[in-house]
Amino acid sequence: MSEDNLPHIRFGPNSRMEHLQRIEDTLRRLRTNLRLDSQVNQLNNEVSDAQAPAVVSDEEPLPTALPGPLESMQQSDVTDGASSLNQPELGTSAVDSEDDKRYCWVCFATDEDDATASWAKPCNCRGTAKWVHQGCIQRWVDEKQKGRAGAHVACPQCKTEYIIVYPNMGPLVVVLDTIDGVIFRICPYIAASIVAASIYWTAVTYGAVTVMQVVGHKDGLAMMEQADPLVLLVGLPTIPIMLVLGKMLRWEDQALSLLRRHACKVPILRYFLPNRDDGAQSDDVPPMSDPVSATRILCGALLLPSIASICGKIFFESIHSNFQRTLLGGIAFITIKGAFKIYHKQQQYVRQCQRRIMDYTENNVALYRRQQNSETNQTS
């Protein structure tokens, strides 16, 4: 640019000092603006750090005596050069660097999506999983705690336990939190005690009803009124327990085993307890499994006094004592039921011993299907 086109620029020491002063003021304003921008967003701070040396490198170093070409620069040229510091081309490499960007592993947002969001690095993860929004991690911790404020939460990747700090809310809140924690811990024990007490008083009530049913209503009430309360509290609950334990005794199996050993000696036993026809040893057939049903045992044990009372009234009506009648009725019911059960088990044993696996032929398949259809028709 020629000096004829710059009539307003004066050459001399004073003009050089004025140009230096203008450039220093411009650079000072730029540093102030960049510092304010860095307070708004941390990324702008990194960009400004990359841009500040770039400005110095684009222009000539500023010595105490400016060179001649700089003297011929217009004031508008200086201003344009200063404004070019905010151009995005100078900090493109810093902005586009993947290491400097922050990604939230919950919502996958970055600094560009929300410049005012608060960030946290709560664990030992590296890479894209180390940053997370404060609001996102708060919601994720709430989901894991499920209303339990004191529950520990760890990172799902590195298993690092999060450091969760709560503000001090005063002594009253501390006392209330302590009370709430104690109640939360003792509630299971209180519930278990209530259930146990309910079962106990149910057993006491059942024992009292059973005594009145077996002995008689008036005699049972008179007997319980004369008895010691401690004996009643201990003795009445044992009645359903003893009934259940008695129901669990499988005396029919022992009786059946004894009858099988001596059936060959008594002809009547061979008629009621038919044995195998092929003469094979009983050891060749595995023992049949008899599944145990807890509900069946419980119902049979608790209904036994009522059934014994009904059988006593049917078969032993001539006996005046209600206790003796009920006792004999129970013995008769258990004996008759045991006899039928022994016969049924023996028949199941014979059927198990006489089974065969047929050849898979058309005739056998047709015969098997006809047999199934006939059994279905009989049951329906």
Image: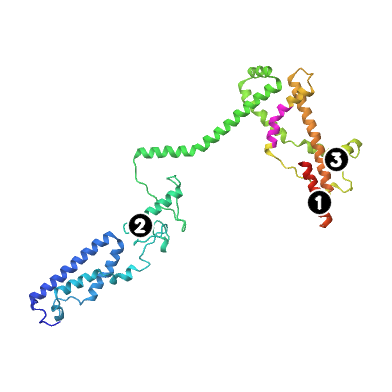
In the image, is 110 to the left or to the right of 57? right
- Where residue 102 sits in the image (x, y, percent)? 37, 62
Label 1 sits on a secondary structure element that is helix
Give amino acid for label 1: Tyr
Residue 59 seen? yes
Residue 343 place in picture, x, y as percent: 82, 38
> In the structure shown, which secondary structural element does the residue marked by tag 2 occupy?
strand
The image quadrant of residue 326 is top right
Task: Classify 277 as above or below 26.
Answer: above
Q: Is residue 286 visible?
A: no
Label 2 vs label 1, nearer the camera: 1
Which residue occupies 79% across, 34% down? 338
Q: Secondary structure at mark 3?
A: helix
Disc 2 target residue: 119
Instruction: Give left or right: position of 311 versus 203.
Output: right
* The label number, if any, that marks residue 260 in the structure image: 3
Q: Which mark is residue 201?
A: none
> Magenta: predominant secondary structure element?
helix
| Magenta highlight range | 296-307
The location of residue 107, given as percent across then percent down, is 41, 57
Which residue is located at x 45 percent, y 49 percent? 143
**Disc on res. 368:** 1
Quarter placement of the C terminus: top right
Between the C-alphas of marks 1 and 3, the distance is: 32 Å
